[in-house]
Image (cartoon, rainbow, N blue to C red):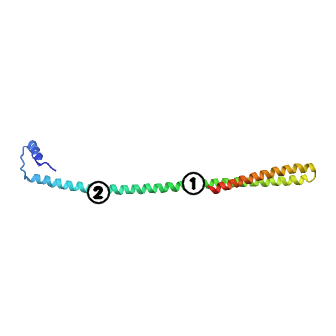
């Protein structure tokens, strides 16, 4: 509230003019006070509405950022999984080719060993080693496929 006595006193000190309690200038001060208070109320309401809208927009942006980040992470994860899957399939194919090569070598060795008994012993050993390599390669290939499927 406005202290009219304080205003009257200040006017008397500064200007050597005594204002009555019902002086029209004091009515103007009252009108100005009312107008300013209403204006402050309106500005405060507008500020609160703008603040609320800004908060809502900020929250929407945060949610949108989270969704975008989630998509980026998912896409990156899928890309890495695909690259690993391709690398494992390539390794399995190489192991399969190696196994086929070893099998051909074993077949050639066993064909050559038919000629002599000593060669037969050698062929048995080569076939056993090739079979062991084939078994190990098969186990490695199965483990690689299982690993890819589990990811």
Instruction: Give the image location of residue 62, x and y in percent.
Output: 43, 54
User: Total label count?
Assistant: 2
Task: Please give left or right for residue 132 compared with residue 86 in the image.
Answer: right
Instruction: Identify the disc placed on residue 77.
Output: 1
Task: Please give left or right for residue 49 compared with residue 78 in the image.
Answer: left
Instruction: Give the image location of residue 99, x and y in percent.
Output: 77, 53
Element on which disc 2 rests? helix
Extreme residue in the right direction: 116
Task: Please give left or right for residue 99 compared with residue 76 in the image.
Answer: right
- Residue at 14 percent across and 52 percent down: it is 29
Instruction: Identify the disc placed on residue 46.
Output: 2
Q: Is residue 11 above or below residue 99?
A: above
Q: Can residue 122 be seen in the rendering of this structure? A: yes
- Residue at 59 percent across and 55 percent down: it is 79
Element on which disc 1 rests? helix
Q: Nearer the viewer, mark 2 or mark 1?
A: 1
Instruction: Give the image location of residue 72, x and y in percent.
Output: 53, 55
Nearest the camera: 78 or 16? 78
Q: Can residue 98 be seen in the rendering of this structure? A: no
């Amino acid at each position: 509230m406005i202290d009219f006595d304080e205003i009257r006193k200040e006017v008397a000190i500064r200007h050597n003019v005594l204002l009555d309690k019902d002086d029209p200038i004091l009515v103007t001060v009252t009108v100005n006070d009312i107008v300013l208070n209403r204006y402050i109320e309106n500005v405060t309401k507008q500020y609160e509405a703008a603040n609320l809208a800004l908060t809502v927009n900020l929250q929407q942006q945060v949610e949108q950022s989270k969704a975008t980040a989630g998509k980026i992470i998912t896409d990156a994860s899928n890309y890495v999984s695909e690259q690993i899957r391709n690398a494992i399939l390539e390794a399995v194919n190489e192991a399969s080719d190696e196994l086929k090569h070893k099998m051909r070598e074993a077949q050639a060795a066993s064909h050559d060993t038919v000629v002599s008994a000593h060669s037969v012993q050698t062929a048995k050993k080569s076939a056993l080693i090739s079979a062991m390599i084939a078994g190990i390669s098969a186990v490695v290939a199965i483990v690689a496929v299982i690993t890819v499927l589990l990811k």
